[in-house]
Image (cartoon, rainbow, N blue to C red):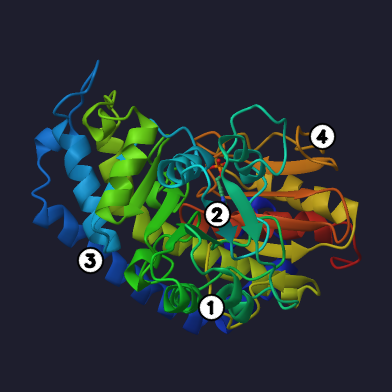
Amino acid sequence: MSDIYDLFGIDKKLKEVAEITEAEIRSEFYQIDRTAEYNAAKVLAAFQKNRVSEGCLGTTTGYGYDDMGRDTLDKVYADAFGAEDALVRVNFVSGTHALSTALFGVLRPGDTMVSVTGKPYDTLEEVIGIAGKAGNGSLKDFGINYKQIDLLPNGMPNIESIKKNIKGEKVAYIQRSRGYSLRPAYTIETIKQIVDAVKSVSPETYVIVDNCYGEFIETTEPVGVGADLQIGSLIKNPGGGIAQTGGYIAGKKELVELCSYRLTCVGMGRDEGCTMGQNRELYLGFFHAPTVTAAAVKTSCFAAQLFRNLGFKAYPAKGEKHGDIITAIELGNEENLEAFCRGLQKGSPVDSYVTPEPWDMPGYRDKVIMAAGTFTMGASIELSGDGPIRPPYAVWMQGGLTYPAGKIGVLSAADEILKLTDFYI
Ligand SMILES: *Cc1c(COP(=O)(O)O)cnc(C)c1O
């Protein structure tokens, strides 16, 4: 069995560490499989309840009136997530677009958005108006105020400060995933604590969750513990590696309605928007999403524990509950970071022969290196990794459509780093 790894040039010595690693994380894998089983059943039940039929897998063009597949998929997502309603559209070009649509959909001039989990994801800064040019049409340009409640030194939300500062504000905004930081991703339990804190002092405040990378990690979603909206990208967890584009917004019915007016036009809302042959992919992807997410979490567990065994700091810590599919590994120097990305790319199904190199990216202070040998461009539910060329030379790795392939990618990344050392001598 382990001889198959010879095909990838994985040395016996590394295979031994991999075997020890897998033995150490067996109980985590057991839990991940249990969660996947529950979530896959939840999704199947939502398909059956909403009578998904062959007709739903068809397509529309033009205005997209009466697209049965599109309208039924909204209900399938809503039921599977435990939401009143959902808006699932290929017309969302990315996660940021879905998040921006939700913020513009809900907030009005004079309102305040309070980010209660510190600084949000980089791409949201221009949407909010804390970066970029005035006059571009950010929330700020439309008279929407922004406040931020910083995290505690341990990376957890400051519940006391949230309670003191949220009263009467329109939106409390939570980012679940760690993004490009080393803070933990938040579990459903932590999200519930924040929701309870907000609602205890300000029941009228809407809690909106950036749920990117968070779907199907646990058996409950943020809307299941009182969040008013959750938002995500279909080239991450809920697209199951099959959706080619899109995003979703799920939660309170009246808020989803407002978001639909922002996605298209006031009055038109969700009744227009053709699906151009994508319905089948979206259904199939959502059907696979619980087990694909489980494969990504297993790949993450394996990567973190393997690199700890090789002497690196890796997060989430052993035994720490996952809140997303990301692993952050501190690689210590530029050579290791480049070697990691080179190896990860080498272990990918697409573009495995390509060598990633650091480059200047718009919006980033330092050069960034990225590895992504993916079927869908930029899909980070597929095995991928990246990091800025600056201390602590950390890589943020995520995805893995299947655990066997994810494991090979991770071993290949480790191998490239170990070749720089005397490990094999
Ligand atoms: C991926 C992601 C987004 C959205 O990014 P897009 O590249 O626009 O899809 C937003 N927030 C977090 C935490 C993310 O991981």
Sequence-wise, the earlier of marks 3 and 2 is 3
Vertical placement of residue 19 versus 121, above or below: below
Q: Are marks 4 and 1 in contact (CB under 8 Å)?
A: no
Do we see residue 204 in this rendering? yes
Name the foreground residue: 237 vs 423: 237
Which residue position is annotated with label 2?
Answer: 113
Answer few, some or many: residues within 10 Å of disc 4's Cα (few below 14, many 20 plus, some between 14 and 19): few
Do we see residue 219 in this rendering? no
Q: Is mark 4 within 8 Å of ligand 1?
A: no
Q: What amino acid is labelled 2 in the image?
A: Met
Query: From mark 4 to mark 1, how far is it between C-alphas?
Result: 34 Å
Sequence-wise, the earlier of marks 1 and 3 is 3
Q: Are marks 1 and 2 in contact (CB under 8 Å)?
A: no
Vertical placement of residue 226 versus 372, above or below: below
Sequence-wise, the earlier of marks 4 and 1 is 1
At x 45%, y 41%, the residue is 98
Answer few, some or many: residues within 10 Å of disc 1's Cα (few below 14, many 20 plus, some between 14 and 19): some
Q: Tell me the number on the disc at residue 41.
A: 3
Between marks 2 and 4 in the image, the one whose residue lies nearer the viewer:
2
Query: From mark 1 to mark 3, how far is it between C-alphas?
Result: 22 Å
Between marks 1 and 2 in the image, the one whose residue lies nearer the viewer:
2
Question: Is residue 378 left or right of 122 when viewed as pictured?
Answer: left
Answer few, some or many: residues within 10 Å of disc 2's Cα (few below 14, many 20 plus, some between 14 and 19): many
Which residue position is annotated with label 4?
Answer: 359
Q: What amino acid is labelled 3 in the image?
A: Ala
Vertical placement of residue 394 versus 376, above or below: below
Which residue position is annotated with label 1?
Answer: 321
Q: What amino acid is labelled 4 in the image?
A: Trp
Secondary structure at numbered mark 2: strand
Between marks 1 and 3 in the image, the one whose residue lies nearer the viewer:
1
